Amino acid sequence: MLKPSLELKGASFTLSVLHINSSDLHAVMAELDSKLAQAPQFFLGAPLVVNLSAIQDNHFNLGLLKELLLSRQLVIVGITGATSVLSHQAKELGLAIVKAGKHTTQAPPPPRQTKILRQNIRSGQQVYAKNGDLIIFGAVGNGAEVIADGSIHIYGALRGKAMAGASGDPTAVIIAHALEAELVSIAGRYWLAENLQQHSSDKSGCIRLEGESLMVESLPL
């Protein structure tokens, strides 16, 4: 039997949500450029859902926003939280209207494997623990990247980028004895260095998801 020329299947993907809180696109882009400069490769070609729940101005130029993001190699795949007027504008631009989905019961993930490294991860190096946790007895330097589908434990200083739950696991955590990271991410939700400094004054900590937002907890002494 010939295989059909196309198949339509359900799938789940982790997408970043860009919250636009101002109608001043000049100010929005200036702030975005500042964030992109800190971690350009992390966002390169990234598909985004734009949350417009804070925008009540029906004259907001969604087409210009799309062009400005494309010029920065970011791709809008849809919008959420928009007024009916902006939703109509989005449809004319070929953008999807994304509604927050209901939580469904999922099968438990397979047992994780653990990757253990007893070394420092230096600038330019990238370490990935596929389908498992990553434990590093050492430091992660500026410009280095550590990625895991599970959790990340760093028994040293985290100064580079750490991305846990890379395959979409929201239960993953990042634990480090010194939180000085350029970027931390869990299941696609991320903080840059400035966000981390705003939410934690402690040297060590555990970063995890609380609902849809990241939070950091102090480690017991």
Image (cartoon, helix red, strand yellow):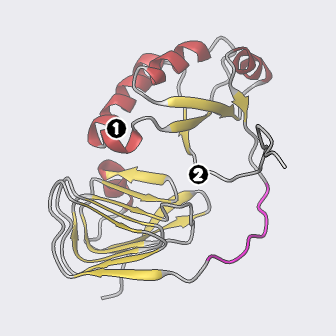
Relative to 45, 121 lies left or right: left
Was residue 107 drawn as part of the magenta stretch in this picture?
yes
Q: Residue at x 47, y 24 (%)?
A: 69
Residue type at numbered disc 2: Thr
Image: 198 above or below 79: below
| Residue 52 appears in the rendering | no
The x, y position of residue 87, in whole percent, is 75, 23
Image: 219 above or below 150: below
The x, y position of residue 45, in whole percent, is 44, 35
Q: Residue at x 53, y 13 (%)?
A: 64
Q: Quadrant of residue 178?
A: bottom left
Question: What are the residue bounds of the magenta stretch?
Answer: 102-109
Relative to 162, 53 lies left or right: right
Relative to 23, 80 lies left or right: right
Q: Sequence-wise, which precedes: disc 2 or disc 1? A: 2
Query: Which label sits on residue 35?
Result: 1
Given this view, does label 2 or label 1 mark the residue nearer the observer? 2
Assess disc 2: are there few (<14), some (14-19) or many (≥20) residues with their C-alpha within 10 Å of its C-alpha.
Answer: some
Q: CA distance from mark 2 to mark 1?
A: 20 Å
Residue closest to the far bottom = 221
The x, y position of residue 177, in whole percent, is 26, 77
Q: Which residue is mark 2?
A: 14
Q: Quadrant of residue 54?
A: top right
Q: Residue at x 18, y 67 (%)?
A: 121
Image: 147 above or below 77: below
SS for callout 2: loop
Residue closest to the far front = 1
Was residue 24 drawn as part of the magenta stretch in this picture?
no
